[in-house]
Amino acid sequence: MIYLLETKLQDDKSIFFSLKNLYGIGNKHAYSLCKILGFSENLKTKNLSEDQIKKLVKLIGNSNIIITSDLKKKKSLALKNLVFIKSYRGLRKIKGLPVRGQRTHTNGKTASKPLK
């Protein structure tokens, strides 16, 4: 098992799908990282050498991709800001109701139930 940026990558998967397990990296970024480093999409994670792993970590660090704990922190701060300024979305989020205009007359009743 390879640990990369607080995430355990599976050995039996290809590097393309293993990179998608990192929080904040999707299809587009995983494909571009493989292409820049010259990895085949079918290259297994267990076949990576130490040098290739170092290049991968360096490339992710130098790119402008916000990943893992930084991205989670940014998302939580954005939500706290919505609650702080008492926007409509923030107030709906506090009450546990749907935020994006879904109806609540027949659906969404489970979202508004208080937790026991």
Image: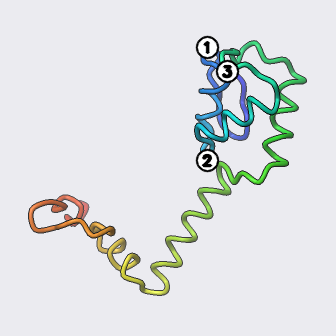
Q: Is residue 72 found left or right of 46 in the rendered image? A: left
Q: Residue furthest left?
A: 106
The residue that label 1 is drawn on is 12
> For this rendering, which residue is in front, 72 or 101?
101
Q: Is residue 12 found left or right of 58 in the rendered image? A: left
* Amino acid identity at mark 3: Glu
Image quadrant for the C terminus? bottom left
As displayed, is residue 25 above or below residue 84?
A: above
> For this rendering, which residue is in front, 75 or 1?
75
Q: Residue furthest bottom?
A: 85
The residue that label 2 is drawn on is 24
Image quadrant for the N terminus? top right
Callout 2 environment at 10 Å: few (<14), some (14 to 19), or many (20+)? Answer: some
* Amino acid identity at mark 1: Asp
The answer for how far apart the CA atoms under marks 3 and 1 are is 13 Å
Query: Do labels 2 and 3 touch, CB within 8 Å?
Result: no
Q: Residue at x 90, y 24 (%)?
A: 51
The residue that label 3 is drawn on is 41
Q: Residue at x 76, y 30 (%)?
A: 35
Residue 102 x/y as whole percent? 23, 65
Q: Residue furthest right?
A: 51
Residue 20 x/y as whole percent? 60, 34
| Viewer-side label of 3, 1 | 3
* Amino acid identity at mark 2: Gly
> What secondary structure is found at the residue carrying circle 1?
loop
Q: Quadrant of residue 50 in the image?
A: top right
Callout 3 environment at 10 Å: few (<14), some (14 to 19), or many (20+)? Answer: some
The answer for how far apart the CA atoms under marks 2 and 1 are is 21 Å
Q: Residue at x 82, y 46 (%)?
A: 61
